[in-house]
Amino acid sequence: MQYQQTKKMYMKNIVGLVLSFIFSITVVFAQQNTVANLIAEGVKLHDRGDYSGAIEKYKQALKIDKNSQQANYELASTYYAYKKFDESLTYCNKVIAANNGYVDQAYILKGSILDESGKHTQALKTYKEGIKKYTNNSLLYYNLALTAFNLKEYKDADNALMKGLKINPSHASSHLLLGYSMSVQGNRIKSILAIGNFLMLEPTGKRAESALALYEDELNKHVKNNDSGGVNITVPFSKKDEEFSSADLMLSLMQSSNNNEANKGKSKYELLAENMKSLFSMLGELKKENKGFWWDFYVGFYNALNNAGHTETFCYYINQTKKDNSVYTWLQDNNKKYSDFSNWYISYKRN
């Protein structure tokens, strides 16, 4: 009899514990669901420009779960958009200190705040701290590079961009910034290689217009028509870009011959395609005797593109921002070439 009573008491306790556990799980799930809903509502308000409304939602979420790093990060992001940098930094630091989600994004946001506040050195330090923890976050490298570039610390900017592009070769902004950096430093061929890759990823829009203008400037940089109807070619020499000097000279010679009698009747896009085929082919040959980021990452890419027969398509494709009917007509009439080019790019694996 006593055994039966003990057994009943034991079973009663077990059932009580199970029900208590289920209740606890239900409460936690309900809280998590509520927190997620509040954050989602906050994000929608943020996107509509209602920053004060968004902040209120995130703070409600934190009252339920004070350890929600998503809520802390979203608060930091909204305060940043609200131009309340001190508050934004406070929540960035909370996320970083907790070290439990959204930390790499908090480093990026914190660095952006410091940079925009004129604290460029601190911004660089923040990005570098973030990179030590998150070595594969390409955006940390890009943001570091952007700050360094604006400070005219080009070597640091270039190194960061190259590391970031190895992680994410499809990050258009990194190609663009690297192209601008090379242009500022007088590295013509490198600028052309980087800007061309940007235009493959982003062929239309305001950034594309500026990038294409730079691309064309670089192509014609050392070629000028003289008063007698001839062409003057400047032959620059830079020890830091000596490895590309022969390609630089060859490109100038090709560009200067565009107005020759033999080329009359050819469109500028046809001439561009012919010149790029020759340039990419030459660079491919030079690659056999050279190594390093530019030769492996860019030259190898363009050489493969050229060998696959896509250079002509590439030249029309990157000129879309001109809104030239002849460009659109060519792309429409050569849909198979465009499709093959697109598929090739998607499947290409960079070194």
Image (tube, rainbow, N blue to C red):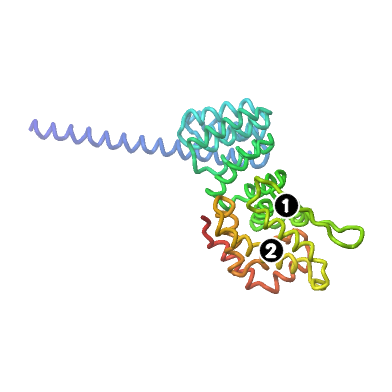
Q: Earlier in the sequence, mark 1 or mark 2?
A: 1
Q: Is residue 203 left or right of residue 88?
A: right
Picture layout, residue 218 above or below residue 282:
above
Which numbered mark, 1 or 2, is in the foreground of this view? 2
Q: Are marks 1 and 2 in contact (CB under 8 Å)?
A: no
Q: Quadrant of residue 322?
A: bottom right
Residue kind at label 2, given as amino acid type: Met
> Mark 1 falls on what kind of element?
helix
x and y percent of residue 78 in the render? 62, 34
Q: Amino acid at mark 1?
A: Ala
Q: Quadrant of the N terminus?
A: top left
Q: Mark 2 highlights which residue?
A: 276
Residue under numbered circle 1 = 211
In the displayed structure, 345 sits above or below 297; it is: below
Residue 347, compared with residue 6, is above or below; it is below
Could you tell me residue 118's position as x and y percent? 68, 28
